[in-house]
Image (cartoon, rainbow, N blue to C red):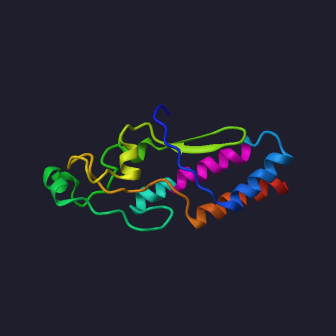
Amino acid sequence: MTNKITIEHNSQAVIDVLQQLLDNLGDLSEPMQRIAAELEDATEQAFADEANPSSGEAWPVLSDAYLKANPKRKGGKMLQASAGGLAASIASEYGDNWAQIGSNKIYAAIHQFGGEDDMAPGPAAIPAREYLGISKETEQNILDILEEYLLS
């Protein structure tokens, strides 16, 4: 992934289990592959739900100005307009002690974090539509993956 944004989720429960695994085991590629897939699934669900995966809060609606300029987008799924769009660009990677998801789209960050109030209207001054994050359910799924691996 050429453009990199790091979003850290500091769940102490996940960190504690990961540290225990790292202390006791060497290569954790197997659970990290499953965790990467879980993160990717959660992100795909955020696009399907058009909601922040951490909070469940719905994304802000598209502005009237945007819909007027892009009439084909009315009623359609946000950030999923084409097979080459942001939703389709989400990919996961993993290694022996890490898992990550991300996008190679240059505009991915502006959708995750939103634009600033002082940015020009249009493509830059937009509200955040967070698609990366970890819900309580995803966090529990990750803990289950780690526990299963640790106890196997």
Q: Which residue is the extreme one toward the left? A: 68
Numbered marks: total: 0
Residue 109 x/y as whole percent:
40, 45
The secondary structure that most of the magenta stretch takes on is helix
Q: Check the image and name the residue furthest to the top.
A: 2
Image position of 101 (left or right of 110): right
Residue closest to the eye, 17 or 82: 17
Is residue 5 rendered to the left or right of residue 32? Answer: left
Closest to the observer, 117 or 32: 117
Q: Is residue 35 magenta?
A: yes
Foreground: 17 or 41? 17
Magenta segment: 30-42
| Quarter location, residue 152 | bottom right
- In x, y percent, where is residue 151? 84, 57
Where's residue 33, x and y in %?
Answer: 66, 44
Residue 14 magenta-highlighted? no
**Residue in the foreground of this view, choosing between 113 and 74:** 113
Q: Residue at x 28, y 63 (%)?
A: 61
